[in-house]
Image: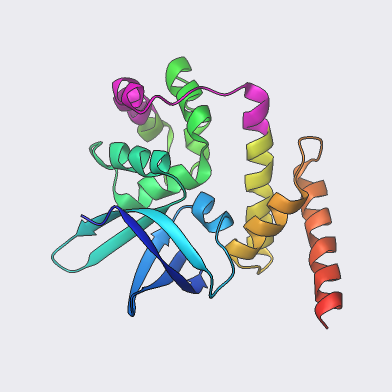
Amino acid sequence: MIGRIKGQLVEVVDQRVLIDVGGVGYEVDISTGALAALPSVGVEVTLYTHAQVREDAQLLFGFQSKSERDLFRVLIRINGVGPKLALSVISSVDMGELANSVAQNDVSLLVKVPGIGRKTAARLLLDLKDRLADLAIEPVAARNHADRTVAIEARRALVSLGYKPADAARVVDSVHTDTLSTEEIVRAALQRIARQTETSA
């Protein structure tokens, strides 16, 4: 099992990266948290990983932290949850917010994740009740949930405008504050991108 990977970042395409480790290139599908924390291409990067071996493929999934990876491993043990859906949950939901949802049996957070309806969300909350305790994930304040939702929506808006997810994540994180709405963050992000383009021209 490959639990961690460290090497030179060669390429970023959507949420997949290519990392050179001693002359071998590893393709890794990563969470948005890992995506936002990536260095520039050519710089060394370290990711916690989970490897999956199938008859038709060998897949590697990467995460910013051990906690993200551990949650991913909990999710894929749940019946009906594959790696892609688990990665989507981790990329869309803060772990502390997920702990809140599980404690309150509230599906409203999970139904915002692409591919999850109310029935699936309810089943996930039930299955996660006992399993999250082993991860020692602390609930977060409701205000933090609102802040993260705004940032995620802003990133998605930039991606829909044609920007790469990695670029959208970086610029949103650079302008995001808890006083700005989604529209204000997108506007500020576009202004920053325009200034950066003018500077590099």
Where 5 falls versus 118 (above or below)? below
Where 72 falls versus 96 (above or below)? below
Q: Is residue 48 visible?
A: yes
Whole-percent x, y for residue 155 in the image: 65, 54
Camera-side residue of 110 and 180: 180
Q: In the current view of this chain or complex, which residue is farthest to the left?
A: 55
Q: In the current view of this chain or complex, which residue is farthest to the top?
A: 104
Whole-percent x, y for residue 32 in the image: 52, 52
Residue shown at 42% from the left, 72% from the top? 18
Whole-percent x, y for residue 144 in the image: 65, 29
Residue shown at 62% from the left, 21% from the top? 141
Q: Is residue 50 magenta?
A: no
Camera-side residue of 112 and 169: 169
Whole-percent x, y for residue 124 in the image: 35, 30
36 displayed left or right of 89: right
In the rendered image, which quarter is residue 22 located in?
bottom left
90 displayed left or right of 193: left
199 displayed left or right of 52: right
Say which quadrant the N terminus sits in.
bottom left
Say which quadrant the C terminus sits in.
bottom right
3 displayed left or right of 184: left
Q: Please tell me whether the stretch drawn in magenta is mainly helix, strand or loop.
A: helix
Q: Is residue 137 magenta?
A: yes
Q: Which residues are magenta?
A: 122-146
In the rendered image, which quarter is residue 46 located in?
bottom left
Residue shown at 77% from the left, 50% from the top? 175
